Image (tube, rainbow, N blue to C red):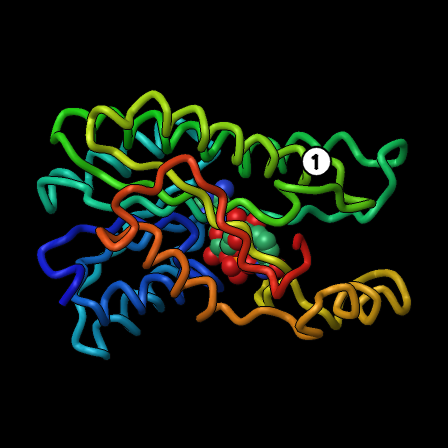
Amino acid sequence: MEFENKVILITGAGSGIGRAAALLYAQNGGTIIVSDIDPNGGMETVEMVQANGGEASFVHCNVAVYKDVQQLIDTAVERYGKIDVAVNNAGIGGASWNKTAEHTLDDWDNIIAVNQTGVFYCMKLELQQMSGQGFGSIINIASIAGLRGLPNNAAYVASKHAVVGMTKTAAMEYAKRNIRVNAVCPVFTVTNLFDPDKIPVEGLGDKLRGAIPMKRWAKVEEMAESILWLSSDKASFITGHSLSVDGGITA
Ligand SMILES: NC(=O)c1ccc[n+]([C@@H]2O[C@H](COP(=O)([O-])OP(=O)(O)OC[C@H]3O[C@@H](n4cnc5c(N)ncnc54)[C@H](O)[C@@H]3O)[C@@H](O)[C@H]2O)c1
């Protein structure tokens, strides 16, 4: 199996895309460190992996808190000795759906702290560990909002553009050290973060779905497959890439 004897760290694995990735890596032989700010969701993912015969354990971490991320990386290395793949997936959408002038300051601060600074904290410490061990593969979960504008989401779009930029930069810095750094950019995927039934503007859901050439929302399993492939040795010469998984919307 492709990920046998490999240690996979996933932030925000207590739900949605992160959980789907945890289940798929485990099916492919990986040992999973399930991390999340929400211990209930995280433990649920661990139990799901174990129920399928896979190996996983939970580490609590708020990615916006540097000492939490330090503890996450330390615990992962104490438990398993190395990190082969890190999936920096934890992210939030924010409460407001407002034009830039009306965007709340709280939403700005929270979204940037989790989606942008959180990815930076994780990358910083993962790259230190991976440099020491001499190998590694990082996948950052950005968004199509990291590649184009999305009205009413200034902070989210800014944070995801930053993730794409940090991915490119780290890829160039660490290519010689046998570390690949890539991003996956999902389109609207049905999860707790994106519930089409809760879009606060009448008719906007249909409009957004209609803008996707494949005319449907993405599934978490489709994101997991792309994350797995891009992190695997099958993508061994790919680094600094942002892979749109988007039904054609950025074509
Ligand atoms: N669902 C979509 O349409 C979509 C589209 C593009 C990108 N994304 C990105 O995919 C990633 C996963 O989102 P999802 O859709 O699966 O959402 P989700 O809400 O189902 O999962 C996100 C997980 O992250 C955890 N989390 C939130 N804040 C955290 C923090 N500070 N520290 C650690 N964990 C935290 C949550 O508890 C949750 O388990 C996010 O980065 C999101 O921005 C999602």
Residue 228, quarter of the rendered image: bottom left
**Quadrant of the snapshot with the N terminus:** bottom left
- Whether residue 38 sits left or right of residue 34 in the image: it is right
Label 1 sits on residue: 155
Q: Please say whether residue 40 is visible from this viewpoint.
A: no
Residue under the image location 21 percent in, 61 percent down: 56
Picture layout, residue 235 above or below residue 20: above
Picture layout, residue 61 above or below residue 198: above
Picture layout, residue 217 above or below residue 62: below
Q: Which residue occupies the foreground of this view, 78 or 170?
A: 170
Residue under the image location 55 percent in, 38 percent down: 115
Q: Which residue occupies the foreground of this view, 4 or 195?
A: 4
x and y percentages locating residue 6 in the rendered image:
14, 53
Q: Extreme bottom residue here?
A: 52
Would the CB of label 1 be found within 8 Å of ligand 1?
A: no
x and y percentages locating residue 85 in the rendered image:
25, 46
- Whether residue 54 sits left or right of residue 153 in the image: it is left
Picture layout, residue 238 above or below residue 38: above
Q: Which residue occupies the foreground of this view, 233 or 21?
A: 233
* Local crowd size for mark 1, using a 10 Å CA cut-off: few (<14), some (14–19), many (≥20): many
- Whether residue 81 sits left or right of residue 144 in the image: it is left
SS for tag 1?
Answer: helix
Residue 81, quarter of the rendered image: top left
What amino acid type is highlighted by mark number 1? Ala
x and y percentages locating residue 98 in the rendered image:
85, 44
Q: Please say whether residue 162 is visible from this viewpoint.
A: yes
Question: What is the total number of numbered labels drawn onto the structure image?
Answer: 1
Residue under the image location 14 percent in, 25 percent down: 132
x and y percentages locating residue 157 in the rendered image:
68, 39
Residue under the image location 66 percent in, 55 percent down: 251
- Whether residue 54 sits left or right of residue 12 in the image: it is left
